[in-house]
Amino acid sequence: MAPASLREIGAAVIGSGFIGTVHVEQLRRLGVQVRGILGSDPARGAERAAALQVPRAYASLDELLADPTVDVVHVTSPNRFHHPQVAAILAAGRHVVCEKPLAVTSAESAELAALAARTDRIAAVNFNIRFYPLNQHAHQLVHEGGLGDVRLVTGRYFQDWLLHETDWNWRLLESEGGSLRAVGDIGSHWIDLVTFITGLRVTEVLADLATFIPVRRRPRGPVETFATGGAGETVPEPMTTEDAALILLRFHNGARGSVAISQVSAGRKNSIAWEIGGATAAAAWDGETPDHLWLGRRDEPNQLLLRNPALMNATGVAAASLPGGHVEGFGDTFHALFREIYGAILAGRMPERPRFATFADGHTEMVIGDAIARSARERRWVPVEG
């Protein structure tokens, strides 16, 4: 029997770092009961549980799944753990929300998508950037023909948190995060976002990957994501993952696209930007100014829509929590996304056309990543399989 209210749903979070903490905070805001967290080791888990005032720190995944009060598990662990953890969670009959990427290989993501398809549990991938309200508004705008037939999709995702050779994070290591780093970590967000907004499917890619810092200084101790302090004692670590990428895209309707991705662009903290050009109009958005949507016209004045529930379409309004003039940011996207996911849990079924990313969507991103990696190796256009 499906629960009657959000307060009847118990959740646990695997991972207690930057993103895991965001999950805990936004679940609480939604009214979901956070039963406990699973850290990278028992001591770390206990420390973070106390800091976050979470009632329990699990010593293992088995202990977490043995807790009958946990209905949903959020997976925010390093990428290499996603496949075994998610498979165990689904086997235990729990709903699951997994951070992107869904896995480290498309073979793993295909298996997880198939497992999810065979269960009645809700299985979602945390592509939260879809849930800035103006991105949801843009989705409906394009779907209703507000830009005409989509012709050109361009943009970027730039960050600078790995600009220096002393910057470090587990995502730098192929063994932890997978063979694609900048593309897998943030490029997947951009591709998921524009395909969600436009409804277009990527069919071919031409990619150029670059590693500008071939050797980094790895700290001997742990480092938090986006940490800006000194690295302390370090050792050299050769890099096999990319710092940046330039990618050309072809879509199934004949539209063309391009995106630049970088984690070494000075001054850009988290700039995910897109512009979509259609036959009759255009639209553009930048995540560093998320409450502004530019709308371009040829034969009438351009417009700048400030996020305002009184002015947005129904899809945009559904993702908004605050009145116009009150900026909704990164954390709010998790709240809006979780509201959709947990609404499906309350309903007891997956929506016919979910606005959140499914495991099938997560697998699609992995397959596109395969094509990007192959294109960069072979220096040619590569079709996206399947």
Image: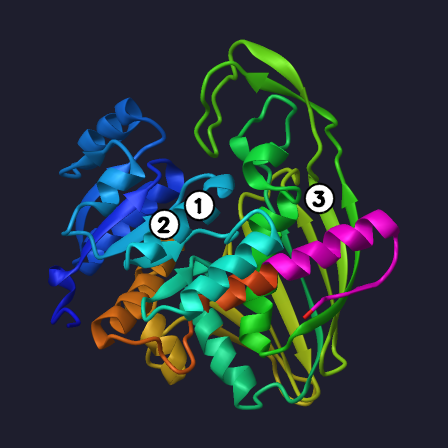
Looking at marks 2 and 3 on the same chain, the residue that comes earlier in the sequence is marked by: 2
Q: Which residue is mark 2?
A: 88
Q: Nearer the viewer, residue 204 or 145?
A: 204
225 on left or right of 8: right
Q: Nearer the viewer, residue 329 or 295?
A: 329
Three-letter code for the amino acid on which mark 2 is drawn: Ala
266 on left or right of 321: right
Frontmost of labels 1 and 3 is 1
Q: Quadrant of the N terminus?
A: bottom left
Secondary structure, magenta segment, majority class: helix
Three-letter code for the amino acid on which mark 3 is drawn: Ala
Cα distance in 3D space between marks 1 and 2 = 6 Å
> Which contiguous range is marked in magenta?
366-385
Q: Is residue 175 above or below residue 25?
A: above
Residue 144 at x, y = what percent?
52, 90
Cα distance in 3D space between marks 1 and 3 = 29 Å
Residue 270 at x, y = what percent?
53, 48
Tell me if residue 306 can be seen. no
305 part of magenta stretch: no
Which structural element holds mark 3?
strand
Disc 3 crowd rating (10 Å Cα; few below 14, some 14-19, many 20+) is many
Residue 19 at x, y = what percent?
39, 43
Residue 325 at x, y = what percent?
34, 65
Q: Residue at x 64, y 69 (%)?
A: 275
Q: Which residue is mark 1?
A: 84
Cα distance in 3D space between marks 2 and 3 = 34 Å
Frontmost of labels 2 and 3 is 2
